[in-house]
Amino acid sequence: MIGISALYCDKENEGDAIRYGRQSHGMKNMPNAHEVPKSSAERRPVTAWNITRTCNLKCIHCYTDSEEKAYSGELSTQEGLNLLDDLKAFGIPAVLFSGGEPLVRKDIWALAEHAKEIGLRMTLSTNGVLIDEETAQRIKDNGFTYVGISLDGIGDINDHFRGKKGAFDKAVRGFRNCVKVGQKVGLRLTLTRHNYENLDQIFDFIEKENVQRACFYHLVYSGRASDLTDEDLTHEETRHAMDTIIRRTDDFHSRGLDKDILTVDNHVDGPYLYMKLLEKNPEKAEKVKKMLEWNGGGRYSSGVSFGDIDFKGNVHADQFWMHYSFGNVRDRKFSEIWTDESDKVMSLLKHRLDNLRGKCAKCKFLMMCGGALRVRADLVYNDPTAPDPACYLTDEECGISPADREELKAKGEDFPVPEHLLKKRTAPSGV
């Protein structure tokens, strides 16, 4: 995650401790504040657990390819309780209940009550459709520190992505019910061609509905999204989207609105934000550079400080690595699987700077970006050591000379960027 509010606007939040290795005295005393880890490399993983694959919607970009039907093989209630105990003993910062749609699992409240009893920090990732007033209160009473509701546009745009008419109106109801009971709630949006031209409307929605947080995800070709390359933003459009996100975040801050805005799944956003700050405030830019380099970007993300457990108990580097498992929690504890570097992919992820090839190996922002998202390279090039094709910085911005590019070609490391990411399109008005 790249904290736009934290980095560009100096807004403090409880996540700064694990993202940037810092915590003010005032924030340290907040009830949901994280402990500051010794180093970014030693962070335990925030762990997403897909507690069910069943979903009441059918999103066109679903990474688990979920539908409204029962799936066999889900972890039982007791297996889930045992898993939560192991995650707590391992010292993870938080467990994210996800799906499918987690609220369709009948024993979710028993799982949540147990997590609360053992002091395990919980967050919830949901489509929001099932959050009526009673459910919102139950979420708060069970101790969820945060609820992320997925919304991929306003009105019909969202319903198109969610695969069901009326999903937008029910999600809005979910936001409002969470706000009404005092439950911290945020918006989760995956950037696509259908919604990036309407980002200003999304920010207007965040303000109008008193949403405290927003995470803007970059598309990953996993699950049903493997067929969505035409929906992805070009590099040029990604820059336009980032400009809008930065501009509106700065606007919120200048007007004293307490909003935490982040981008997710493309660590290139860090260097891009740094370059924007360098033009505006060089002194502040250097401070942000140090924070981003401490974080390490992709270097300490999937496989290090973030992990995923699917509904059958298989352990993955993140939610988009469903095609590769390190093992199953029915056979070994998550803590044992996560620390076992005999797996070649786990070893690569934990030591990725020694293995990166192509543009990433030559980039001057490597310590800041860390090679971005390895799963995207694996899905596009069938090679987790290749560059992330979603890197939208030019060779010149990355400090890569024509001679460097020729050297990469000679070594067979001149990975071509997919054509759909390089198309030229007209920027939307207002960007």
Image (cartoon, rainbow, N blue to C red):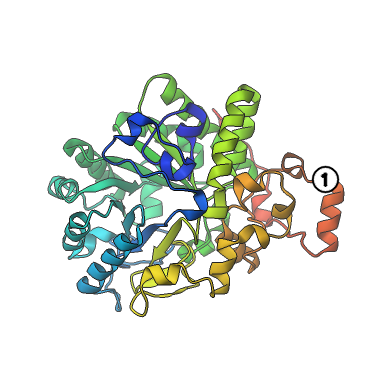
Neighbour tally class for label 1: few under 14, some 14-19, many 20 plus, Cα within 10 Å: few
Q: What residue sits 46% from the left and 36% below the top? A: 199
Q: Quadrant of residue 418 in the image? A: bottom right
Kind of residue at disc 1: Ser
- x, y percentage for residue 210? 29, 31
In front: 169, or 226? 226
108 sits left or right of 417 in the view: left
Is 68 drawn above or below residue 421 in the view shown?
Answer: below
In front: 399, or 178? 399
Write down the residue under mark 1.
401
Q: Is residue 413 visible?
A: yes
Is 209 drawn above or below residue 392 in the view shown?
Answer: above
- x, y percentage for residue 221? 53, 61
Is 373 drawn above or below residue 156 in the view shown?
Answer: below
188 sits left or right of 276 in the view: left
In front: 67, or 77? 77
73 sits left or right of 252 in the view: left
In front: 161, or 17? 17
Q: What residue sits 45% from the left and 40% below the top? A: 262
Which residue appears farthest toward the top when viewing the image?
A: 255
372 sits left or right of 99 in the view: right
Q: Is residue 100 visible?
A: no
Q: What residue sits 64% from the left and 24% below the top? A: 282
Which residue appears farthest toward the left when viewing the image?
A: 134
- x, y percentage for residue 200? 45, 32
- x, y percentage for residue 390? 61, 51
Q: Secondary structure at mark 1?
A: loop
Q: What residue sits 55% from the left and 62% below the top? A: 350
